[in-house]
Structure formats: C-alpha cells, structure tokens
Amino acid sequence: QVQLQESGPGLVKPSETLSLACTVSGGSIASYQWSWIRQTSGKGLEWIGYLYYSGSTNYNPSLRSRVTISVDTSKNQISLKLRSVTAADTAIYYCARDYTGWYAFDIWGQGTTVTVSS
Amino acid sequence: QSALTQPASVSGSPGQSLTISCTGTSSDIGGYNYVSWYQQHPGKHPKLIIYEVNYRPSGISDRFSGSKSGNTASLTISGLQAEDEADYYCSSHRSTSYRNTVTLAPVIFGGGTKLTVL
C-alpha cells in the first residue's frame, strides 16, 4: 500500500528556508494531487498547497509568495520549500494524498515537526 | 472566515450515539458537497473517515456517518467505543474568491472537536 514519509531538518533559523521532502513508496505519484498541510496548536490544520503529478501546482494565497512545491519523479518525491520563515511557521508538516481531487486526504505521512528558532 | 466552526469538546458514554457539528457558510459547506471528516489520535496523523459529505473510505466502520443541511455538516458516531476518543476535524472545499477582491485557499478546516468517551 502507498506510504508517505516526510524528512528534513527539525530546526530552522528565522529568515531562512524550510526544506522538506515527502517520499512516496508502494505506489506511483501519477494520477493524484499531493498536498502539504501543517498543524499548529494555535491555528489547527492549514493547507499549504498541492502538486499534481504532471507538475502543476496551487498554493494557499496566504503563503504563495514564500512557497514552492516541486516533484522529482525519479525519486517518487515531493518537496516543499518555505522561504523567509518566522516563529509562526513552527508546526508539524504533513504530506498527504488527495483521494478524490477535491481535498479529501486519504493517505498521510507521519508528520515532521519543524521549529523556527535562532 | 479563518476556520469552520466546531464545538471544542463533546462527550458520551460507550454505546451511545453522538453528533459533531461543523458550521460554515454558503461559500464552503453550503455550496459544495465536498465535506470531509478526520479522526486524529494523540501523536498521530489525521485519518480520513468521511469524504464528500457521507462516503466512507474502505476500512472505515459504518458506525461513522456524515450528513449536511444548509451550511452545517454533521458527523455521527453510533455505538460509541473507547477507541473513538480522539480529536475530530471537518474540512470543506470552498470558493476561492471573496467579494471579488480576496483570494482564499480552496480548502478550509474546522478548529477541531475533542471527543471524550466517559
């Protein structure tokens, strides 16, 4: 069965770039939208953006100026870059598969905690 | 609108039925049949239990059911079990334009409801 695994630094300094990878195993990236979602205790769940396997993307307008989601099909990997981070970007970051194409996320990674601090 | 409105907490005894509400607007829940519900146990990722208002993914117990009336969606859990104790989140696709000036994220989540089994 398809499994997702996030990876990346757990600590990022303010103003730097947060970089995470999501490796898809047990299946192909093809034919699905893959989203990044983050969770904080204060703001709950927040959708960051998605990438369709063809490479097209859509981002949360509130983050659009700072976010890039890309794909490496040779590695079956989806990457997230969030620039100019602040403490407000401290969260658990999840990658997730969109089951229907209408934002029903049926497969999630285990999540990775990222703290923004100097 | 920053989040769909859910009660902060609900509780019930084993064997009882219980309903969690999720209130939005005509631009999200009221306008689309793309409401999802997630169950999240402590330290775990959210798990999709309902999508498109009332469909269950494979492997999800039929004790979970969803419905919608107007701008409010509901999750009903029948035959409450100890293992149902968790946080529950709703989400909905929504219109991405607001008053022709603001662009919004295409999916919005509820603030979460903590279910306690007495």
Image (cartoon, grey):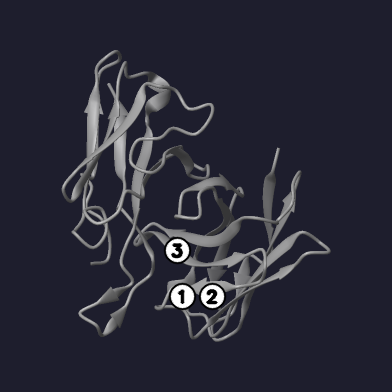
Q: Which of the two labelled residues, at mark 2 and mark 1, occupies the earlier sequence position?
A: 1
Residue A73: image x %, image y %? 78, 64
* Residue visible at 40% across and 78% down in the picture: A62
Mark 3 or 1, closer to the camera: 3
| Amino acid under disc 1 | Ala
Q: Nearer the viewer, residue B24 or A62?
A: B24
* Residue visible at 35% across and 40% down in the picture: B88
| Amino acid under disc 3 | Trp
In the displayed structure image, the side of residue A51 where residue B60 appears, left or right: left
In the displayed structure image, the side of residue A92 where residue A52 appears, left or right: right
Residue receiving disc 1: A87
Q: Chain of mark 2?
A: A
The answer to whether the residue labelled 3 contacts the one labelled 2, judged by CB atoms less than 8 Å apart, is no
Name the image quarter holding residue B94: bottom left
| Amino acid under disc 2 | Ser
Residue furthest top as drawn: B15
In the displayed structure image, the side of residue A90 where residue B26 appears, left or right: left
The answer to whether the residue labelled 3 contacts the one labelled 1, judged by CB atoms less than 8 Å apart, is no
Residue receiving disc 2: A117
The answer to whether the residue labelled 2 contacts the one labelled 1, judged by CB atoms less than 8 Å apart, is yes
* Residue visible at 32% across and 19% down in the picture: B80
Q: Chain of mark 1?
A: A
Mark 2 lies on a secondary structure that is: loop
In the displayed structure image, the side of residue B117 where residue B70 appears, left or right: left
Q: Alpha-carbon neighbours of circle 2 within 10 Å: few (<14), some, or many (≥20)?
A: few
Residue B79: image x %, image y %? 32, 15
Residues beneath discs 2 and 1 located on the same chain: yes
Residue receiving disc 3: A47
A15 w.r.t. B88: above or below: below
